[in-house]
Image (cartoon, rainbow, N blue to C red):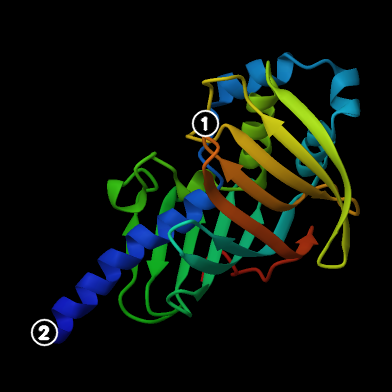
Amino acid sequence: MLTLLRQETIISDFISLAIMCAALLLFSGMTPAAENFAVASAFSQSEKTANPVGLSQQQFQHLQSYQVLLRSSSPQGESKIIRYSYRKPGFVRMDFTQPHSGAVLIYSPVSRKVKLWPFGLGMFPVLNLSPTDSLIQDDHGHRVDQSDIGVLLSNIRRLQQDGTTVTVGEETLAGRSTSHLSVTGPEGVSVDDVNRYEVWLDNAHRLPAKVVSYDRQGKWLETVLMDAMVINIQFPTDFFTP
C-alpha cells in the first residue's frame, strides 16, 4: 500500500513537472489564432524580410518536423534535459533525461489527448489526459499542445510590436554562428510574464539556438538552450503513436 501511495505521489509530482517543462518551451504560452493574425498583419512583407524573427517564422512555416535537445535552467536551480520532437500538424513527444530519466510524454492532434508514461515507455501506468486538464497545466495555463518553436516566435513578435528590437551582434554559441537579438516589449507590457527576450538565432537554419527570458522588473525567468537541432527529420511510423 505504501509503495502504491509513493508511486501515486511520484506520478502527481511528475505531471506538474512535465507541464512546467512543456511550458518552458514550451515557451511561455500560446497566442490565440486571431491574435496571431493581427500581429502578423501589423508587419508588412518587407518588414518580415528585414526582421530576423520574421525570417525565423518563415523558416518554421516551411519545415515539417524537427527534433532538438532542450536544456533549461531557472533561478530556482531547476535543471531539465528533454529530447523534444515535433511533427506538423502538431504531434509532440518529450523524452525526459533529467529529471525522471526515461519518462515519456506524447500529444496527438488526432486524438487531442496527452499520454504520459512516468516510468518509461511501455511501463505501467499510462495516463491519458486532456491537454486542458488542470493537472497538466502550470499556473499560467501553458499547454503541451501549444509548446513548439512557432509559439516562441509568435510571442517574440508580439513584444516587437510597439517594443524595441536591438541587434546585439554575431556570436559563436557552442561552435555555432548565431545572431543575438534583444527584444523588449513596451513598458508595462508582457507576454505571459515575459517582457524581454534575449534570442540567439542559428545562422545556419535561422531557428532559435538559445533563449533567455526576463519579466517586467528585469528579473531573469529562464534560460533555454536548444542543441542538436535536426530539421525535417523522418520519424519512425509509430514514433508519436507507440
Which quadrant of the structure image shows residue 6? Answer: bottom left
- In the depicted structure, whether residue 92 falls above or below residue 155: below
**Residue 57, image x and y in percent?**
77, 37
Q: Residue furthest left?
A: 1
Tag 2's secondary structure?
Answer: helix
**Residue 199 in sight:** yes
Q: Quadrant of the N terminus?
A: bottom left
* Closer mark to the observer between disc 2 and disc 1: 1
Which quadrant of the structure image shows residue 91? Answer: bottom right
Number of numbered labels in the structure image: 2
The kind of residue tagged 1 is Arg
Distance Cα–Cα, label 2 vs label 1: 45 Å
**Residue 179, image x and y in percent?**
86, 46
**Residue 88 in sight:** no
Residue behind mark 1: 216
Q: Residue at x 52, y 36 (%)?
A: 215
The kind of residue tagged 2 is Leu
Q: Which label is found at residue 2?
A: 2
Tag 1's secondary structure?
Answer: loop
